[in-house]
């Protein structure tokens, strides 16, 4: 079918796709260590085949799914999104995957389903960060979205990037991408999707509730208690061009997602 | 002999700076070279501070006076790393946005604590020369004890940046704590006794005080 739309970046100078090497060697994936270079260094040990995703909770079609089963016969789309990390840096990354809404629809949420909860693999033998004695995260890593957020057309399940299969350090074999929220919401290496009635606990919120909320929408006017969120460093940068730019509300995707939060005080629900 | 040590310390402290600069110049420092320098300088400064503070216990243990001569040199390097660390923060993280600096200084505890530590280190560096020692007399020693406060502030500064894993921080905190314990009078006396016991039998083998 003729379903395509070419992209004209709003700011061609700034909205340049990050080099593959940067997007795959500068990662936060604490399961493999807390240094930005740790995931690229250690994620090679992770075995992603076979992979099984457990679907449970308020779903008409619960069960164990392989990645191809979960994606069914959906065609992969490319989505070029800005990724804004809560640490105040950002990159532009081309993902390959399917809209999350298509997958959720097939799982047939019941009337009680209000939230979607996601869980990352817990396998200390292949994930050195999970073996750390001084780690503060309570494994497995967990994240969540409100059901209407999950059904928004921008929410995406990625299985590839840069036209190839997802590297382990970027969340192979399947990960979430929610471009209007801070990067930590985009959970990696998913092994469980639960449709639930109550708002699920999320890992960073559990660790520091005053610093990380459930919503975690990109919001320049709500600072992280330890640093400002008003600006970000667009990467890659250089010593002569630090690329410090203004952060935009909802990471610039307000037109598509602002309606989700119409009556909410985003200072309170950060 | 001491001159050789001085040159060695100079080269050893300079080498990481050249190594990191080389990495940045070769585009091997990742997508955010400014942050790469910032973090390495911060961590390097902390290591230098711990090394500086290890010289007094080492002098007690080995009874070699040379350590106290390179102490000032290492202290000055610690301060230099700190100043470079601050410069990286201003240039590459804030992009020289002075209003952002004001906001950080008024609101962010880890920045305030880091700034206080650096003020102490700079004060100690300025007063580390013979002239200041003479001028300050007995007060010099009490002033330079503030290096312990600087260590505590630097560790706190580091702790408040950690997001999810305390492994590295714990190592530095443990080292810092041990160096402080060795300064407690009973520990210091025990260390000196041990030093005497080690060095007496070897009296004939020649000391390094030259």
Image: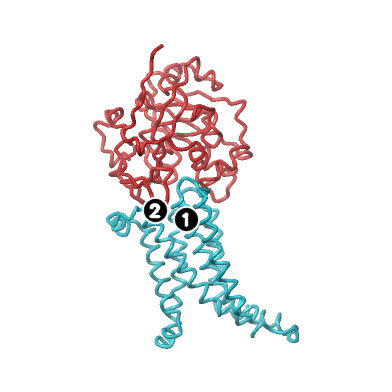
- Residue beneath label 1, please? B37
Secondary structure state at the residue bearing disc 2: helix
In the rendered view, would you say A218 is above or below A48? below
In x, y percent, where is residue A249?
29, 38
The secondary element bearing badge 1 is classed as helix
Residue drawn at point x = 48 percent, y = 68 percent: B78
Q: Quadrant of the C terminus of chain B?
A: bottom right
Q: Which chain is red?
A: A
Q: Residues within 10 Å of mark 1 (few under 14, many from 20)?
A: many
- In the rendered image, which residue does mark 2 sit on? B92
Task: State the residue in front, A108 or A128.
Answer: A128
Identify which residue, B176 or A43, lies in the foreground.
Answer: A43
**10 Å crowding of disc 2: few (<14), some (14-19), many (20+):** many
Q: Residue at x 60, y 43 (%)?
A: A128
Left-right relation of A126 to A180: right
Residue A142 image position (x, y, % from top left): 47, 35
Q: Position of residue A270 (x, y in %)?
A: 32, 40
Q: CA distance from mark 2 to mark 1?
A: 9 Å
**Disc 2 + disc 1, Cβ < 8 Å:** yes
Name the chain letter of the residue that bears numbered label 2.
B
Residue B115 position in % (x across, y down) = 37, 64
Q: Colour of chain B?
A: cyan
Counting residues from the start of the chain, the first of labels 2 and 1 encountered is 1
């Amino acid at each position: 079918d003729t379903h395509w739309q070419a992209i004209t970046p709003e700011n061609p100078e700034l909205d340049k796709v990050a080099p593959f090497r940067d997007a795959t060697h500068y990662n936060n994936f604490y399961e493999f260590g807390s240094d930005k270079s740790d995931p690229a260094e250690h994620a090679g040990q992770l075995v992603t085949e076979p992979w099984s995703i457990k679907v449970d909770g308020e779903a008409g079609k619960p069960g164990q799914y392989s990645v191809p089963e979960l994606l069914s016969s959906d065609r992969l789309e490319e989505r070029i999104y800005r990724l804004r990390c809560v640490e105040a840096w950002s990159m532009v990354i081309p993902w390959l995957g399917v809209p999350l809404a298509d997958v959720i629809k097939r799982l047939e949420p019941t009337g009680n389903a209000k939230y979607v909860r996601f869980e990352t693999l817990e396998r200390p033998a292949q994930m050195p960060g999970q073996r750390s004695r001084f780690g503060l995260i309570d494994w497995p890593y967990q994240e969540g979205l409100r059901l209407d957020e999950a059904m928004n057309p921008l929410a995406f399940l990625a299985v590839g990037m840069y036209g190839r299969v997802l590297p382990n350090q970027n969340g192979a074999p399947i990960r979430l991408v929610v471009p209007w929220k801070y990067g930590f919401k985009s959970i990696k290496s998913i092994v469980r999707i639960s449709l639930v009635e109550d708002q699920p606990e999320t890992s960073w919120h559990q660790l520091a509730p005053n610093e990380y909320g459930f919503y975690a929408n990109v919001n320049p006017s709500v600072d992280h208690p330890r640093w400002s969120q008003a600006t970000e460093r667009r990467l890659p940068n250089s010593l002569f061009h630090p690329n410090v730019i203004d952060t935009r509300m909802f990471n610039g995707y307000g037109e598509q997602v602002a309606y989700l939060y119409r009556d909410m005080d985003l200072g309170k629900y950060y | 002999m001491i001159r050789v040590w001085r040159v060695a310390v100079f080269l050893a402290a300079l080498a990481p700076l050249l190594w990191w600069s080389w990495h940045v110049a070769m585009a091997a420092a990742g997508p955010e070279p400014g942050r790469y320098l910032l973090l390495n300088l911060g961590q390097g400064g902390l290591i230098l501070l711990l090394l500086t503070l290890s010289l007094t216990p080492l002098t007690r243990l080995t009874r070699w006076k040379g350590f106290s001569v390179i102490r000032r040199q290492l202290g000055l390097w610690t301060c230099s790393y700190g100043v470079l660390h601050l410069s990286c923060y201003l240039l590459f993280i804030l992009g020289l946005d002075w209003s952002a600096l004001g906001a950080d200084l008024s609101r962010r505890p880890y920045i305030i604590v880091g700034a206080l530590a650096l003020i102490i280190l700079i004060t100690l560096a300025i007063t580390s020369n013979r002239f200041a020692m003479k001028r300050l007399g007995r007060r010099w020693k009490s002033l330079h004890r503030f290096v312990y406060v600087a260590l505590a502030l630097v560790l706190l500064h580091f702790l408040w940046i950690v997001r999810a894993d305390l492994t590295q921080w714990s190592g530095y905190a443990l080292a810092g704590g041990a160096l402080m314990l060795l300064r407690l009078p009973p520990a210091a006396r025990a260390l000196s006794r041990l030093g005497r016991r080690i060095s007496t039998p070897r009296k004939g083998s020649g000391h390094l005080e030259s």
